[in-house]
């Protein structure tokens, strides 16, 4: 095997100066977790990390790193002794794998300025050698199809030509914690994953209303949490709130066209209280401006009036097809479109108001004492995480 290392390039971490150490430490931990099944050595430096592969396959190790937030790209690297012969052999080995008529360029970085060959000398030497030995190729220094990278360092010469793009962003855990309102739909898992990309750790809250919502609907949300956890390497905790009593009370007391607004308001009240309990600094949802009646500006205004807590809406202005493409890319789409209904679909009003007025909603809500039911719902929360394997198996059989 020619490759013995993986080079890891950092994403936005490189923009940090004073607190970069904290970001690198978090990334090191997250990479370690992602690589737990591999027998490799990880060295995370100030500007990049190297993974020493030992007997592990570079492809599998890169697969494991691809979705670790904070990594911009990875490359399989051959570390060579500092000799001209070793560089030439490796360059030809890479070049043999390129296609007929492809163009290439030799790119040299001389981190060790004391090396006896200068950048230009190495370029000339390797370029000429490759052309002589792999005549199917041509040189193009402006827009090459392949770049053979040569880094001259004190401890050896590092060569590579493949660059695999990764997810980028910041390491999870460096941006504090947020509470994601997770329905079984397409949008909210994507919203959560987008926020996680910025280094924010997520806990999730889901409202269910058995028996009006099926066990399969709850299981679907758990599966989404599994997918999101596996994807990010984070162990996302899901809080499942029993919402039946509140939902039926709303149905009985609030006029049909305003029931959606009240439902969302009460969900938000509960989410805020849980957020405070788990030390989350914001609530995240999958709202998208104008998508449905509950997501017009007037609706968001009426719903949001119950809280001063920051509510993040990472999908606010995206097109639905963009969100679907993101969901497919994240691997949540197939689960999201399973046909089990969540509580709001079942209690869906026939013609919800697109412009609810806060004062009117408040007037109807004031006729009911929701507070004891809210307390009860909070007290009845059940928790789930990807590690709850036994319980998961039990639910799997329901699908
Ligand atoms: P999604 O695809 O995320 O379900 P949606 O387009 O279907 O979104 P709504 O059903 O109006 O939109 O919900 C808007 C947002 O409210 C959701 O993105 C989610 O964050 C939150 N939400 C809705 N229902 C629930 C629920 N049962 N539990 C937790 N959060 C919910
Ligand atoms: Mg929904």
Image (cartoon, rainbow, N blue to C red):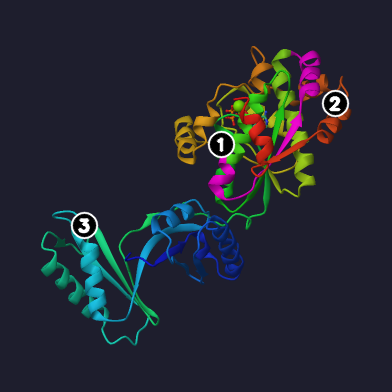
What secondary structure is marked by label 2? loop
The answer to which of marks 1 and 3 sits earlier in the sequence is 3
Of labels 2 and 3, earlier in sequence is 3
Label 2–label 3 contact, CB within 8 A: no
When asked about the image quadrant of residue 321, the answer is: top left
- Residue extent of the magenta highlight: 227-255
Q: Which mark is residue 316?
A: 1
Residue 190 in picture, x, y percent from top left = 55, 38
Decide if residue 182 is in sight here. no
Q: Earlier in the sequence, mark 2 or mark 1?
A: 1
The residue carrying mark 2 is: 370
- Residue occupying the point 32% across, 59% down: 162
Q: From what the image shows, is residue 332 above or below residue 82?
A: above
Tell me which residue sits at (59%, 42%) in the image: 192
Left or right of residue 63, residue 198 in this image? right
For the residues labelled 2 and 1, the Cα–Cα distance comes to: 30 Å
């Amino acid at each position: 095997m020619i490759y013995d290392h993986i080079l890891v390039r950092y994403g936005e971490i490189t923009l940090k100066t004073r607190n970069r150490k904290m970001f690198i430490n978090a990334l090191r931990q997250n990479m370690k977790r992602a690589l737990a099944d591999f027998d490799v050595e990880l060295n995370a430096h100030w500007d990049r990390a190297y993974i020493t592969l030992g007997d592990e396959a570079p492809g599998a190790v890169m697969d494991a790193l691809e979705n670790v937030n904070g990594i911009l790209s990875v490359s399989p690297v051959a570390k060579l002794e500092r000799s001209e012969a070793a560089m030439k052999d490796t360059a030809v080995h890479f070049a043999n794998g390129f296609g007929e008529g492809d163009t290439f360029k030799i790119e040299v970085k001389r981190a060790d300025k004391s090396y006896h060959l200068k950048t230009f000398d190495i370029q000339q030497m390797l370029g000429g050698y490759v052309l002589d030995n792999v005549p199917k190729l041509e040189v193009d220094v402006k827009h090459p199809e392949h770049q053979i990278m040569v880094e001259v360092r004190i401890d050896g010469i590092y060569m590579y030509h493949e660059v695999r793009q990764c997810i980028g962003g910041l390491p999870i855990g460096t941006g504090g914690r947020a509470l994601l309102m997770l329905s079984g739909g397409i949008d909210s898992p994507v919203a959560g994953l987008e926020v996680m990309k910025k280094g924010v750790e997520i806990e999730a809250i889901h409202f269910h209303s058995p028996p009006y919502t099926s066990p399969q609907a709850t299981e679907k949300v758990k599966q989404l949490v599994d997918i999101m956890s596996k994807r990010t390497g984070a162990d996302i905790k899901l809080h499942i709130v029993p919402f039946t009593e509140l939902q039926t009370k709303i149905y009985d007391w609030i006029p049909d066209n305003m029931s959606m607004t009240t439902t969302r308001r009460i969900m938000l009240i509960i989410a805020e209280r849980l957020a405070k309990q788990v030390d989350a600094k914001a609530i995240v949802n999958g709202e998208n401006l104008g998508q449905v009646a509950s997501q017009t500006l007037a609706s968001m205004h009426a719903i949001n009036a119950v809280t001063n807590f920051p509510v993040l809406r990472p999908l606010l202005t995206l097109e639905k097809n963009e969100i679907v493409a993101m969901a497919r890319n994240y691997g949540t789409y197939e689960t999201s479109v399973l046909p089990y209904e969540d509580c709001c679909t079942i209690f869906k009003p026939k013609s919800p108001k697109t412009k609810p007025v806060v004062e009117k909603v408040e007037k109807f809500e004031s006729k009911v004492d929701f507070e004891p039911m809210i307390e009860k719902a909070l007290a009845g929360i059940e928790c789930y995480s990807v590690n709850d394997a036994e319980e998961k198996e039990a639910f799997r059989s329901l699908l």
